[in-house]
Amino acid sequence: MCCLQKGIQMIYFLYGNDTYRLKKTIDAMREKYGDSSGMNSSLYEADYDIEKIRSDMMSLPFLSDKRLVIIKNIISAKGIDGKKIVEMLDKKPDSTVAVFIEEGEPDKRTALFKRLTKEKSKELNLLQGGELIKWIKAETAKQGGQIDTKEANMLAGYYGGDLWQLKNEIQKLVSYDKEITEESVEKLSVANINVKIFDLTDAITQKSREKAFKVLSELLDSGENGMYILSMIQWQVRNLALVYDLKNSNERDIASKAKMNPYIVKKTLSATRKIESIDTIKNYYSLIIEAENDIKTGAKDPDVSLELLVNKLMD
């Protein structure tokens, strides 16, 4: 990992929405600079006692070369004077390794953010595209399995850049069969909401009420939040709009031009071909916005709103 290379200042800053890689960075730092006694390492992730942080930051290590201080989400914490942390960084001994981790997008206007980005900093956002496929292949190999690009694209289409879930799914698939196939992915990933959203969209475009309400019922019974289900329906309608515009091109060209995962293109294309005109998709959007307003204003129960929406989408 480039961000773990030794530097003069020994100050590291990682931030972004990829909590998996942020956690792995913390683990790597502890392995590299921590000690078995735990006397030379500190982790702050909720209780930011400035004086205690200062003491840990300024103290020399005990019977060791380095002292490790990890501080999580302090930029977004309320009531923290970031300038005091900056002062500590300017005065800390070289033996202290200071690691700052910020989940999400920190306020870039703060003095602490500006100071930390002058050090060894890196933004870790959810992987996508080729980088995500490379990670899936590497993780599969790490777990003793084999996967081709086609199946890796399927997993990326189902789970996006959620590396926590992808790791679990890969483990499940490799336990089932060392060689991950399209059949095994479909068989073992049927409970995933993305898979069911594809099924729901297919049913809607086919105007198959029985199938559509069966899939919707499975989603609601699984405990998924109504607004989240609605947002996923909206996401897939957006995919329909993108693919509809390019439906006369081949799948590879569509994926390239629309900047979409090839497997999502494949799953969306069949539904797109059943849509008569772009006006149908525009109507989908209008109905989704109507359902969203009903849920947000409390005019209708989320489950009822979703059932009415699915029914209207097939009219």
Image: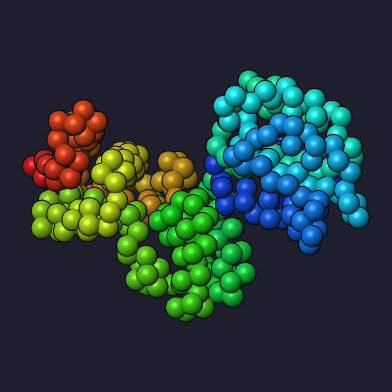
Q: In which quarter of the view is residue 96 placed? A: top right
Picture coordinates of residue 131 (x, y %)? 59, 51
Q: Is residue 27 left or right of residue 303?
A: right
Q: Is residue 41 left or right of residue 206?
A: right
Residue drawn at the location 60% of the way across and 24% of the way down = 79
- Which scheme is used to colour this image of the protein? rainbow
**Residue 231 shows in this picture:** yes
- At 50% across and 50% down in the image, what residue appears? 161
Q: In the drawing, does residue 253 fall left or right of residue 139?
A: left
Q: Indicate left or right for 232 with 100 as reference.
A: left
Compared to 43, does 80 lie above or below? above
Q: Position of residue 56 (x, y in %)?
A: 79, 40
As displayed, is residue 145 above or below residue 19? below
Q: Quadrant of residue 47?
A: top right
Horizontal and vertical percent position of residue 283 = 18, 33
Q: Quadrant of the C terminus?
A: top left
Residue at 62% over, 42% down: 45
Say whether residue 32 is visible.
no
Q: Nearer the viewer, residue 304 or 141?
A: 304
Above or below for 192 versus 124 = below
Residue 44 position, x and y percent, is 66, 42
- The residue sitting at 88% across, 51% down in the picture is 62
When asked about the image quadrant of residue 293, the answer is top left
Count of numbered badges drawn on the protein? 0
Nearer to us in this view, 253 or 117? 117
